[in-house]
Amino acid sequence: MERRYRHKDDRIFWARVNYSLVRDLNGKPDYLVGIIEDIDEQKRASERMAEQEADYLLNLQQRVQERTHELEDANQRLQKEIEQRTKIEKELAEKAAEEAVTADRTRLARDLHDAVTQTLFSASLTAEVLPELWEMDVDEAVRSTEELRQLTRGALAEMRTLLLELRPAALTQTRLSDLIKQLCEAFIGRSRLPITLSIEGDCKLPPEVQVAVYRIAQESLNNIFKYARATQVNVSLSLFPDGLHFEICDNGIGFDMSTSKPTSLGLRIMRERAEAIGADYHISSTPGSGTCVEVIWNANPNIKLRVL
């Protein structure tokens, strides 16, 4: 056993006492042998070791707590930086989208302005020669009169379209079928190409859907006028109580979709407009076989509609 003793100089010290039993020849207890061992230094060393270990554990715990607080503070700062960066990136993306839409509208308005000027100039030239044509060739004069009628109707449609660009809110105040008819009339006056227009059904559409389909139709007709070299255009619009189907096809030169750039022919902006309303957007084209653009939209209350 280990216990404390008092030394003759009144000092307290630790000692270990060992007793061993000694037996006689008959195996009976005879006497005890006792040894007292001074273990004070060993005991003091163990106590100092225990104190040092306790101090070390306490310091280690404090350092862990301090480091934990530092990491929590750093994590909070990082989280705030991430939130701020996400907010800034979102604002930049929204600004870039707004600028892209503004640039697209400006481009369309410029194209429409140029188209109106060209159409009115052609109508002016036709009107100047009409009196002479009536005297020289009546049939040609009749044909030119019909051409003048188409030019003036096209110019009027172009002007209405230009006014829509200046007053975007009017896009949601007019029926989609009337907007598509107006686009087709403007296209005929500008390109003098025949359009087969088919419209079925009539229903009120969400403003976001109406604007998106109108813009896609407008971009498609502009692409046909600029690039397709078509001789015939087919436009169809089917309206249902809970959806619509829009398709525009031409018999122009088409293009190779595998080599076409994502931004060419306004494909990217049309696809983004369709995605903004949750519509299915398909475009098919092969060189020499024309191009078809198709938009299918079905009402879905779980999709948040957006306007681009």
Image (cartoon, rainbow, N blue to C red):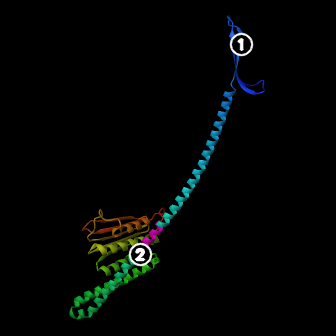
Instruction: Indicate whether residue 95 is drawn in magenta.
Output: yes
Closer to us: 99 or 132: 99
Residue 182, magenta (yes or no): no
214 above or below 147?
above
Disc marking residue 32: 1
Judged from the image, the secondary structure of the residue bearing numbered disc 1 is: strand
Count the labels in the image.
2
Which segment is the magenta one? 93-103
> Residue 51's image quarter?
top right
Percent of width and height locating residue 207: 46, 72
Which sits in the foreground, 288 or 109?
109
Q: Amino acid at mark 1?
A: Leu
Residue 307 in view: no
Q: Which residue is mark 2?
A: 105
Q: Quadrant of residue 123?
A: bottom left
Image quarter of the N terminus? top right
Q: Identify the mark nearer the N-term, 1 or 2.
A: 1
**Number of other residues with Cα within 10 Å of mark 2, as a class: few under 14, some 14 to 19, many 20 or more:** some
* Residue, far front: 9
